[in-house]
Image (cartoon, grey):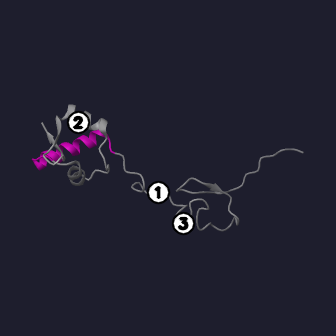
């Protein structure tokens, strides 16, 4: 018996990456059989599920401008909100680099709240 390759067209979910052969080849499936997404055939948008990546240079510029414009020490939440940054928490390595690059100072106030300022 000779072995021959057989190629069959299948489907791939744009959400979870699962691949399958549909039961009816001429009918488009309604949902992914694995993750059950009805949007299996549509690519994810950039803001979907993955926070948009920010470069360190963009991050530094936003932090510096936000603190300078405020003229007063701010909390991370205030900086993130005003600067429209996608990160819930700042990258520690970037924060330490900001201390060297722009003279960022972080101090705790009487209530234990960390305020960011430029020194």
Q: Residue at 23% x, 36% y: name it.
A: 98
Residue at the far left in the pictured view: 71
CA–CA distance in space, label 2 to label 3: 44 Å
Q: Nearer the viewer, mark 1 or mark 2?
A: 2
Is 43 contained in the magenta span?
no
Is 66 contained in the magenta span?
yes
In-image side of 86 versus 23 (left or right) = left
Instruction: Tell me which numbered mark, 1 or 3, is placed earlier along the sequence.
Output: 3
Residue ID for mark 2: 98
Overall secondary structure of the magenta section: helix
Task: Name the secondary structure under disc 2.
Answer: helix
CA–CA distance in space, label 1 to label 2: 33 Å
Residue ID for mark 1: 44
Is the C terminus in the top left, top right, bottom left or bottom right quadrant?
A: top left
CA–CA distance in space, label 1 to label 3: 12 Å
Q: Is residue 29 above or below residue 3?
A: below
Provide residue 95's location: percent of width, then percent of height. 26, 38
Instruction: Tell me which numbered mark, 1 or 2, is placed earlier along the sequence.
Output: 1
Provide residue 37's location: percent of width, then percent of height. 54, 63
Residue at the far top in the pictured view: 100
Q: Residue at 68% x, 67% y: name it.
A: 26
Identify the mark at residue 67; answer none if there is no mark: none
Magenta region:
54-73
Task: Name the secondary structure under disc 1.
Answer: loop
Q: In front: 95, or 64?
A: 95
Residue ID for mark 3: 38
């Amino acid at each position: 018996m000779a072995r021959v390759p057989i190629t069959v067209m299948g489907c791939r979910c744009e959400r979870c990456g699962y691949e399958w052969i549909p039961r009816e080849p001429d009918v488009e499936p309604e949902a992914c059989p694995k993750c059950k997404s009805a949007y299996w055939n549509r690519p994810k948008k950039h803001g979907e599920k993955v926070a948009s990546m920010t470069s360190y240079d963009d991050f530094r510029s936003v932090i510096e401008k936000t603190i300078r414009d405020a003229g007063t020490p701010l909390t991370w939440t205030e900086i993130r909100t005003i600067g429209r940054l996608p990160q819930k928490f700042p990258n520690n390595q970037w924060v330490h680099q900001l201390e060297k690059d722009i003279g960022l100072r972080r101090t705790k106030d009487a209530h234990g709240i960390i305020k960011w300022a430029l020194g």
